[in-house]
Structures are given as C-alpha cells and as structure tokens.
Amino acid sequence: MEAAFYYCEHFNKIKEFMAELSEDNQVIMKSKELFASSELQGQLAIVKGTFTSLVAPIASLEEHLPLVESIKIVSRIKEELVLKPFASKLSNILQKNPGFQVMEQMARVLSGASQDLQGMNSNLPFSFKNALITMVDCERSFSKLKGILSDQRTNLTEEHVQDLLLIQWNKEIL
C-alpha cells in the first residue's frame, strides 16, 4: 500500500522520468505503457483514498494484542472498507474461514457480549484470550530459522540453535 501511496503522490514526476528512459527492455516498455494509461493515476488515487485510514489498523494486527482487541480491529476494517471489490473479497475470505468464526465467537464470550459456547468446553475461551489472528509471528520465526538452519550449519547442537535464536530474536536490545 505504501508503494501505491508513493506512486499516487509522485505520479507526474515518475511519469516524466519513465518517458526519458530508452525502450531497450520489456519492463521499461510495459512501465511506459502503464504510465500512459489515462486510468492509472485515478486508480492509484482510489487506492490511496480507500486504504490510507486502514494502514494503521492493519499494521496493528501484527502486534501481540488480545483476541478481543484484534477482532474489534478486523470489525472496524470491515466497516471502513466500503469499495466493492475489496470489501467483497474481505467478506468472502472471512466467511469461508470457519476458524475465524470460532475466534469471533470466543471474542464475544471473552468480552461478555455472549455466553453461548456453542457446545464447546467452558475453559476454551480462556485458551483463546491471547490467540493471534495473523500468521506474521509464525512467518517471522520461519524466516529467522531459515537463516540459522542453513546448509552451512549442519552440525548445530540443540543448545547452539537455542542460543542463536535467542540472539536473533533479541538483537534489538543487544
């Protein structure tokens, strides 16, 4: 989104720069073709107008928030996202995800808005209290592990892996 915002704000300067480039490569030719389109600048403006207010809430979902707070953020995004193709896509994705529906129900129970456990164990909502609704942490962990468990490091002991992970995850404070 940040890139689309940048292109929207600097559209004419980028278009002028693109015009000065020689057409010796397919990427440049395609870029020039796109910037010549009368629709591109308007489409970028629509994206910027639609998503500017949603950048902060979407980014906040990457933080370690309680489930109730995360579900509130998603609800707010659903309410603010009104442009047809984007709103429809988000709605379809959430409706097709039974896990998200369970998390919404657990958030209603945890917030006191509902007492209906839908036949689930009464301890289950408290297990969900700090559940993450994005895969960002998981993806970050795999990314960090990829750097540690490389082909060059085939003889690592479990203790060394733990030490390397500790350093990797806490490098900002070290």
Image (cartoon, grey):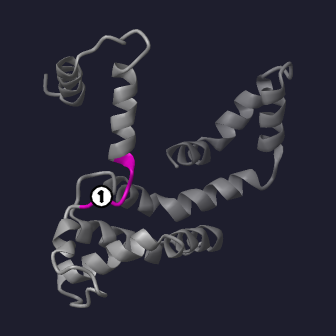
Judge by depth and name the residue closer to the eye, 81 or 152.
152
Magenta segment: does it hold 132?
yes
Q: Main secondary structure of the magenta part?
A: loop
How many marks the image carries: the answer is 1
Q: Which quarter of the rendered picture does the C terminus lie within?
A: top left
- Of residue 38 and residue 2, the one placed in the foreground of this image is 2
Q: Quadrant of residue 23?
A: top right
Identify residue for label 1: 132
Residue 137 position in % (x across, y down): 32, 45
User: Residue at the spot x=41%, y=69% of the render?
Assistant: 99
- Left or right: 36 with respect to 169? right
Rendered residue at 33%/20% (across/down): 148
Give me the residue at 52% from left, 76% from top: 95
Range of residues picked out in magenta = 131-136
Does 159 sit above or below residue 61?
A: above
Examine the image and state in which quarter residue 102 appears: bottom left
Instruction: Give whichever of 141, 75 is nearer the camera.
Output: 141
Q: Residue at x 20, y 61 (%)?
A: 130
Residue 91 lies within the magenta run = no
Q: Residue 92 appears at what percent x and percent y?
A: 57, 73
Q: What SS does tag 1 mark?
A: loop
**Nearer to the camera, 23 or 93:** 93
Residue 42 x, y percent position in the rendering: 69, 58
Q: Is residue 7 above or below residue 46?
A: above
Going by the image, does 3 lie left or right of 142? right
Q: Amino acid at mark 1?
A: Leu
Q: Quadrant of residue 115?
A: bottom left
Estimate how packed mark 1 is, as few (under 14), some (14 to 19) or many (20 or more) residues with alpha carbons within 10 Å.
many
